[in-house]
Image: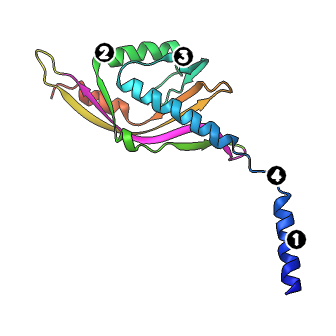
Amino acid sequence: MKKLFMITAVLLAFAACQPPADNSANEMFKKNSATVMAYLKAFQAENIDYTIFSDDFVSVGTSFGSQKDQSLQEMIDLDKRMMAAYDFKLLGMDSLILLPGVDQKTLTMNGSVRYYGLWEVTKPATDSTAAKTGRLAGYESFDFNEDGKIRLQQIYGDAGSLFQYLNSKD
């Protein structure tokens, strides 16, 4: 019994000497997740506050044949053209699960945010064409700078085929 008491006392003393767990990466992830959710809602509402992006922002060119990445201004210009031509809805937005990203070298949480989602994109009807809708499953990730602004965004999904379908004559 005495031996068990000694072992328990040593273990408790050892546990008490451990530094408190660093929760900063989790807190940073929560804060950045709120930014991502606000962005996704604003994108669908076509009312984006681009001040959430850093001045050195880059949107990684992941599409087939992409020759370069986009700057913030190039993304803003593309967003305007896309929003004028299509309606975007992230299905399951209320149950969307945001996942933490990790540093590639240390494999520890780094505040980045990612998700897998299903986008529904509609080309509205015109006087001569009916509305046309397609769905795109994709993966999107966001990296943040030390000020909590989005500095890198990348989207993976077959958007080329989706827009080819939406703009086809059939």
Residue 110: say if magenta: yes
Q: Is residue 103 above or below residue 4?
A: above
Of the two numbered discs 2 and 3 on the same chain, state the one appearing first in sequence: 3
- Look at the numbered discs 4 and 1 and tell me whether their residues touch, using CB distance below 8 Å: no
- Residue at which label 2 appears: 84
The secondary structure type at the circle numbered 4 is loop
Of the two numbered discs 2 and 1 on the same chain, state the one appearing first in sequence: 1
- Look at the numbered discs 2 and 3 and tell me whether their residues touch, using CB distance below 8 Å: no
- The crowd level at tag 3 (other Cα within 10 Å; few <14, some 14-19, many 20+) is few
Closer to viewer: mark 2 or mark 1: 1
Read off the magenta span.
Answer: 106-124
- Residue at which label 4 appears: 19
Q: Is residue 38 above or below residue 74?
A: below
Q: What secondary structure is the stretch in magenta mostly built from?
A: strand
Observer-nearest residue: 10 or 38?
10
Measured Cα–Cα span from mark 3 to mark 1: 53 Å
Q: Residue at x 33, y 18 (%)?
A: 83
- The crowd level at tag 2 (other Cα within 10 Å; few <14, some 14-19, many 20+) is few
Q: Mark 3 is on which residue type? A: Thr
- The crowd level at tag 1 (other Cα within 10 Å; few <14, some 14-19, many 20+) is few
Q: Residue at x 43, y 29 (%)?
A: 40
The secondary structure type at the circle numbered 2 is helix
Q: Mark 4 is on which residue type? A: Pro
Measured Cα–Cα span from mark 3 to mark 4: 37 Å
Of the two numbered discs 3 and 4 on the same chain, state the one appearing first in sequence: 4
Closer to viewer: mark 3 or mark 1: 1
Measured Cα–Cα span from mark 2 to mark 4: 54 Å
- Residue at which label 1 appears: 10
